[in-house]
Amino acid sequence: MRKRNLRSIIVFALILAFMPATARAQQKEMPEVTLMTAVPNFAFGAIWVAEQLKYFEQEGVRVKITPSPSGSVCLNAVVGRSTNFCASTSEGLVLARVEGAPVMAIQAHNRAMTLSVVLRKSIVDKLGLTRQSPLHARLMALTQLGTIGATGPGAASEQIIKFLVKKAGAGSTILKFVYIGAAELPAALMNDVIDAYALSPPSAEVTEPSGKGYVLIPLGKGEVPELTDYHYEVLMVRPDYVEANPKIAMAVSRAISRGGALFRTKPEEAKSALRSHRLFNKLDQPVFDLSYSTVADAMPPWGSMNAAGWQKVINFATGAGIVKDLAQAPSNKEGVLWTNKYVGKP
């Protein structure tokens, strides 16, 4: 009996000693990849939740995530092979393909455009509008503005204002833009230098606590049909990389899809994970709550895509002038701009 007990103790001790070594070996064997996001905002909520809850590791891959200054930097990094994956806006991908860049989308983490259009609060009050006002009345407010801020010429922050004014039936309205970069837009509005701008949360929402700004049109809520059921932020990759690394591509795609799905299956868990992420844990609670409310509905049940959603992206890219020659607009068919080959299933 003593010998049997001693043997059991020895075996158990060996198991305990061996387990950490196995874990270290598995950790060492787990592939490492790099992923850049266009900017560090709530539009990429599925990625931040996946990172916070260790979904990437659960899917068998370690991911180093780095926010970049802009979508073009992110996209160029993928094309130039200095990063493996880029998460950025789909209309940028459309333009890149028109220009011949080897890149495609393998996952979508928004189902609506998430830009929030913020106006100076004094203008909104003068017009007697709120977020609950009829959409057309809010769109018409954009025709009565002075200087509008944008990140750069031709950027989505400019094109979306033009698109919404045209949707209001006031396409002939003269719009005056000033290009000052995303970081400067909130201060410019709060100091009455500009009347409005459009950026994804929390870049517009941060102006509300001061009483200077008011988010009048949160597009992430899905009020504009042309920009809803729309693949906005997508995971991009070079076709040659994804063909050579299909398991890694599927692991990254699945992790982000799981992060987005949590907003629908367990919204409080998603909100808590996002709140505790290093990018947002110091935000004022009202700003966080408003930002979360404007993007939660934009999260898809899964990251798969379809031709109809891509046609909306192409329609916006051509209608807003991002792609200037309609004859050059790419097809919406799977295999051209996008594929579901690597996204997996819930």
Image (cartoon, grey):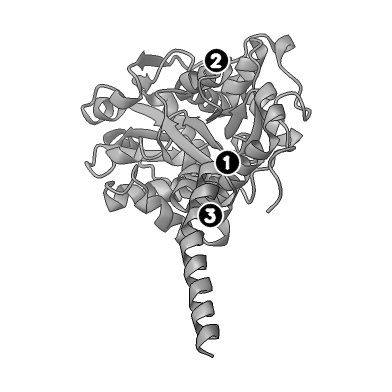
Q: Quadrant of residue 107?
A: top right
Q: Secondary structure at mark 2?
A: loop
Mark 2 packing: few (<14 Cα in 10 Å), some, or many (20+)? few
Q: Is residue 172 visible?
A: yes
Q: Residue at x 41, y 15 (%)?
A: 152
Q: Residue at x 62, y 27 (%)?
A: 237
**Marks 2 and 3 in Cβ contact (< 8 Å):** no
Q: Secondary structure at mark 3?
A: helix
Q: Quadrant of the N terminus?
A: bottom right
In the picture of the structure, the residue carrying the numbered disc 3 is 22
Q: Residue at x 59, y 33 (%)?
A: 235
- Measured as percent of width and height from the top left, residue 182 is found at 35, 25
Looking at the image, residue 307 sits to the left or right of residue 296; the answer is: right
Q: Earlier in the sequence, mark 1 or mark 3?
A: 3
Q: Amino acid at mark 3?
A: Thr
1 vs 2, front mark: 2
Mark 3 packing: few (<14 Cα in 10 Å), some, or many (20+)? few
**Marks 1 and 2 in Cβ contact (< 8 Å):** no
In the picture of the structure, the residue carrying the numbered disc 1 is 109
Q: Identify whether 146 is placed above or below 35.
A: above
Q: Earlier in the sequence, mark 1 or mark 2?
A: 2
Q: Earlier in the sequence, mark 2 or mark 3?
A: 3
Q: Amino acid at mark 1?
A: His
Q: Nearer the viewer, residue 149 or 89?
A: 89
In the picture of the structure, the residue carrying the numbered disc 2 is 80
Q: Residue at x 37, y 34 (%)?
A: 118
Q: Nearer the viewer, residue 253 or 286?
A: 253
- Measured as percent of width and height from the top left, residue 248 is found at 63, 38
Q: Quadrant of the C terminus?
A: bottom right
Q: Quadrant of residue 171?
A: top right
Q: Nearer the viewer, residue 241 or 195?
A: 241
